[in-house]
Amino acid sequence: MNGDIRRGLAARPDCGASLIETLVAFSLTVAVSAAALFLFVLHQRLARAQLDTASLLQAQQAAHLELRRALRAAGRGGLVHQLPGQTPRLEVALEVQKQVRSGHAVGSRTAAEGTDVLVIRGVINGPLYWVDEYGFDPASRRGWVVVYARTPYGSSQSLQMLREAGEAGDDALLLVSGDTSGVHAVVPIVDVAASGRGRQRRLRVEFHADASRGPLTADFLSMSSGGSWPVGHMSRVDRVGVLEEWRFYIRPPDPESLRGSQLAMARLYPGSAVAWRRRSANLTQVIADGISDLEVTVQDKGEDGERSVTVTSTARIGEPAAGALRVEQSAASVIRTRNLR
């Protein structure tokens, strides 16, 4: 009987797994799970990087579109021209502040350290209005122009922007001389009076050219041909326009709000450090997020007398130490300017 028991125990198969087998199975499970998790994280990072790249491309396209539009209007109205025999002043219409230091002021805002600040002046967003009547009193340093909705040549011109500039006050008026080609004056608007209807609607725009009446007037007059009211060259005015100044700069990131760097534009009264209409919101008009650097280079005149401007932007998402999580991309545009001759 004992022999039968021993034969039964020997014939019975093992039940369960040994410790070594359990450890091997567990190790294989962990390895497969880790590989699957690694692949999942990798694909997730790749997908996020592709989305970030697409976002940066879109941001750079928006940034360069706005920069091209503004640069093509730089100096519009003949702002770089001086009195006969004087050298044109390119910096009046187009100025590049290279690799600015920390805390560089853009009005009451600051630009990111090591980036360029692009300053553009000209009749950018509005028309150049044809003038029907003009008068100037040298004794009082006051003058006026009359602009009709219907030009002397039979075409129509919208008076809205000129009317709004007069109602707001302090806007700069660019007057283009009809006596000497290219000669101009920049003065503050004092008042605007509207009358008439339809095509007979007209605006009488009053201005003054007395630099002692305030710093804005002095800033405006400094951009005139010769750096002051061009006496002897303004007995007749052909056209006028609202002169604008825009500054494009990089806003530094804000760790508290988790906001990254941005390309922004600021509108100021031309030649001054005062926000347009004295509203701080006009200093932080964001064009694109994620733009971390702006570099602007102005080339010399070509054979046709035109200048070209190269704008290079760098867009970045993620911290520099993040390695695989950082996406960086650069883009460049070459813009030919026609108003800087």
Image (tube, rainbow, N blue to C red):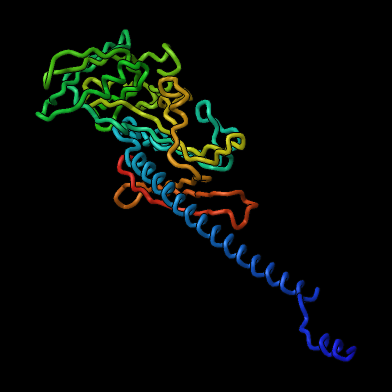
Which residue corresponds to the image point at 35% horizontal and 21% vertical from the top-left? 171
Q: Position of residue 212 (x, y in %)?
A: 43, 12
Q: Residue at x 68, y 69 (%)?
A: 29
- Indicate the quadrant containing the C terminus: top left, top right, bottom left or bottom right: top left
Q: Which residue occupies the foreground of this view, 237 or 330? A: 330
- Residue 105 vertical placement versus 235 (above, below): below
**The image quarter in which residue 43 lies:** bottom right
Residue nearest the viewer, comparing 77 with 155? 155
Which residue of the protein is positioned furthest toward the right in this rendering? Answer: 2
Q: Position of residue 289 (x, y in %)?
A: 48, 42
Q: Where is the N terminus found, in terms of image quarters? A: bottom right
Residue extending farthest front:
1
- The residue sitting at the top extreme is 140
* 33 to 300, vertically: above or below: below
Q: Residue at x 46, y 29 (%)?
A: 283
Q: Position of residue 248 (x, y in %)?
A: 45, 37
The correct choice, above or below, for 170 with respect to 14 in the image is: above
Left-right relation of 169 to 159:
right
Total label count?
0
Residue 109, given in percent of the width and then of the height, sits at 53, 29
Q: Quadrant of residue 276?
A: top left
Q: Nearer the viewer, residue 11 or 92?
A: 11
- Residue drawn at 25 percent across, 15 percent down: 144
Q: Nearer the viewer, residue 270 or 53?
A: 53
Q: Quadrant of residue 101?
A: top right
